[in-house]
Amino acid sequence: MGGRNSVLLAESYCDWWSLAGVEALVGEPPAGWLAVPPANDAAASRPQRVADAAPEPQQLPAALQRQQAEQVAEQKGPVTFPGEWDEFRQWLATSDEVPGSQWDARRVLPLGDAAAPLMLLTAWPEIDDQREGQLFAGAAGKLLEAMLQAIGLMRSQFYAASLAVTRPPGGRIDARDAAELDRLLWHHVRIARPRRLLLIGSDIVRMATGLALPDARGKLLDLNQDGGKVETIAVTHPAILLARPAQKAAAWDSLKLFNRGR
């Protein structure tokens, strides 16, 4: 053997042994390049820690704890209206169960003698009525008096009432209030027993007849009440007539119907 290839083979052996650390001094650790190096992650060499027990949840203060749902109060049935006149008047003045009494602390109660042959009925007090505590107060009341005097009636000859004893916000009511007021309407008319009925204002006309005021004006209406009929006419509220004088003629035509046949 000899030659160039032998020399290269010898150098290759020397390089391999050099990398293995054979030529290192005594006491010097070998390179150990064939061994798998230890993991560098120190946490991997630590024993696994047993998970700590979950801490017990702290109890919330009483104010923040969920409250048990209160039992829903049973809905009350329809209000029972007093059947005797004196008791009914007292009930209108004091009872919290009066439909329409919840809108204002100041109640506007009926006026006049319930035995009068003519009953004036409006839906609820106007703003002036609520302020004065009396139906048809102020300029509207004076106009109404003049209209009734024109057909020969004085204040002492009619009974006036509003269906609701207070005025609803904005002069509007929801369906639930309307249903209760409808019951009160017919009870009030039944207990007053008028021979004639004057409906004043579009709201009460719609409630009592189911008609819009323009369709009811100028007609003598017959409302059924306990098997009998009550002669009824409808007019615009005098507060509206003050703002719209052109409608006075239609109101006058309706009022004249009460004098028919006299």
Image (tube, rainbow, N blue to C red):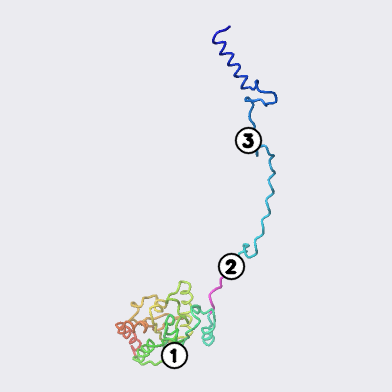
Give residue 72's mark.
2
Badge 3 is on which residue?
A: 40
Q: CA distance from mark 3 to mark 1?
A: 110 Å
Q: Which residues are magenta?
A: 75-80
Q: Are marks 3 and 2 in contact (CB under 8 Å)?
A: no
| Relative to 119, residue 29 above or below | above
Mark 3 burial class by Cα count in 10 Å: few <14, some 14-19, many 20+: few
Q: CA distance from mark 2 to mark 1?
A: 46 Å
Residue 2 rendering spot, x and y as whole percentages: 57, 7
Which of marks 1 and 3 precedes in the sequence? 3
Badge 1 is on which residue?
A: 116
Q: Is residue 217 on the magenta stretch?
A: no
Mark 2 burial class by Cα count in 10 Å: few <14, some 14-19, many 20+: few
Which of marks 2 and 3 precedes in the sequence? 3
Residue 218 rendering spot, x and y as whole percentages: 32, 82
Q: Secondary structure at mark 2?
A: loop
Give residue 149's mark.
none
Name the residue at 50% across, 79% down.
101
Q: Amino acid at mark 2?
A: Val
Name the residue at 62% across, 20% down.
18
Q: Secondary structure at mark 3?
A: loop
Q: Are marks 3 and 1 in contact (CB under 8 Å)?
A: no
Q: Secondary structure at mark 1?
A: loop
Foreground mark, 3 or 1?
3
Q: Nearer the viewer, residue 201 or 159?
A: 201
Foreground mark, 3 or 2?
3
Q: CA distance from mark 3 to mark 2?
A: 68 Å
Q: Amino acid at mark 3?
A: Asn
Q: Is residue 77 on the magenta stretch?
A: yes
